[in-house]
Image: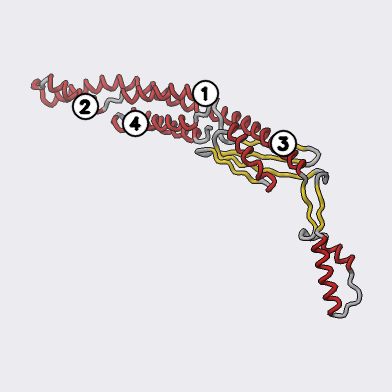
Amino acid sequence: MLKSMTGFGESTQVNGHYSVTVEIKSVNHRFLDIQIRSPKQVNAYETQIRQIIKDTLPRGRVEVFVTIKETSDEGKKVAIHWGLIDQLVTQLQVGAAKYGATDLPVSQIIQQVVTLPDFVEITEQGQTDESLAGLLLAAVTEACGQNAASRLIEGAGLEAVMVANRQVIGAALTQLSEFVTVYETEFSARFQQKLQDYLGSSVDQERLLTEMALLLERGDIHEELDRLAIHLKKFDQLVTKEEPVGRELDFLIQEMNREINTIGSKSGAIEIKELVVQMKTTVEKIREQVQNVE
């Protein structure tokens, strides 16, 4: 069954320290292009995140959005840089004495500086980071799974449209094959009659047959019809495969289009031209859908 490259997955994992939400959006792309937007705590686990995505989503532009919220103060450590505060108070006391101030409000100064990150620092303890890793990777794994599931649903819709268009091409090919057989017979009879009307009884039958053979050979499209039929059978096989077939389908559609163009350039009959236009239009519809197949 075909899979689309368009998908979405989301997962939120929570423990005593963190709430981690991961969103994974994907769209069509020639290769696998992973873009991760996350807080700096996630940098250490980026390689593992990318590997999970590669194992689940083999192709497409994949955007990963990570949001981390702390659910507890446990595991945090407050560090007050008293040495810097001592220097600050000392310098202020020197300044107060210099300008004749008699009362330096030390308590107020301390209340103000503790709000500044240069004087007070909050750090995370190691065990909390380890809990974040498990939470984060679990969220990524679940979001990837949801994305893959949505791709499968989208792919079923793409497959239905493509198969319906393939049937249109198959029907046109059948019409074309039947018409060509009748057309060649009628063309030979008309050509012979025209020559006889023009030259009368002096027509060289051997020369006539040679000329007819050359004309029919120039407009012979049986080989193209056969190859187009083979391409359609290959298409039927590809859409039932489990593994990604987007690139192979894209190449196959190019080959089908090439055969149809050749048929159009070789044939002058208006009936053939009309069927060629119909097939070209339908192949283009399939090609547009194939661009989003994984």
Q: Name the residue type under label 4.
A: Lys
Q: Is residue 51 left or right of 115 when viewed as pictured?
A: left
The alpha-carbon separation of the residues under discs 2 and 4 comes to 18 Å
Q: In terms of sequence position, does the residue under pointer 2 or pointer 3 come before the other?
A: 3
The numbered mark at residue 273 is 4
The alpha-carbon separation of the residues under discs 3 and 4 comes to 63 Å
Question: Disc 4 on helix, strand or loop?
Answer: helix
**Mark 3 or 1, which is nearer the eye?**
3
Q: Is residue 29 above or below residue 200?
A: below
Q: Residues within 10 Å of mark 3 (few under 14, many from 20)?
A: few
**Mark 2 or 4, which is nearer the eye?**
2
Q: Is residue 115 left or right of 247 when viewed as pictured?
A: right
Q: Is residue 36 above or below residue 286?
A: below
User: Would you name the residue on which mark 2 appears?
Assistant: 215
Q: Where residue 294 appears, x then y in whole percent?
A: 53, 32
Q: Where residue 281 appears, x then y in whole percent?
A: 43, 33
User: Would you name the residue on which mark 3 appears?
Assistant: 134
**Mark 2 or 3, which is nearer the eye?**
3
Quick check: marks 3 and 1 in contact, CB under 8 Å? no
Q: Where residue 112 appears, x then y in whole percent?
A: 84, 63
The alpha-carbon separation of the residues under discs 3 and 1 comes to 34 Å
Q: In terms of sequence position, does the residue under pointer 4 or pointer 1 come before the other?
A: 1
Quick check: marks 4 and 1 in contact, CB under 8 Å? no
Q: Quadrant of residue 71?
A: top right
**Mark 4 or 1, which is nearer the eye?**
1
Residue farthest left in this picture: 202
Q: Residue at x 47, y 22 (%)?
A: 237
Question: Disc 1 on helix, strand or loop?
Answer: loop
The alpha-carbon separation of the residues under discs 1 and 2 comes to 43 Å
The alpha-carbon separation of the residues under discs 2 and 3 comes to 74 Å
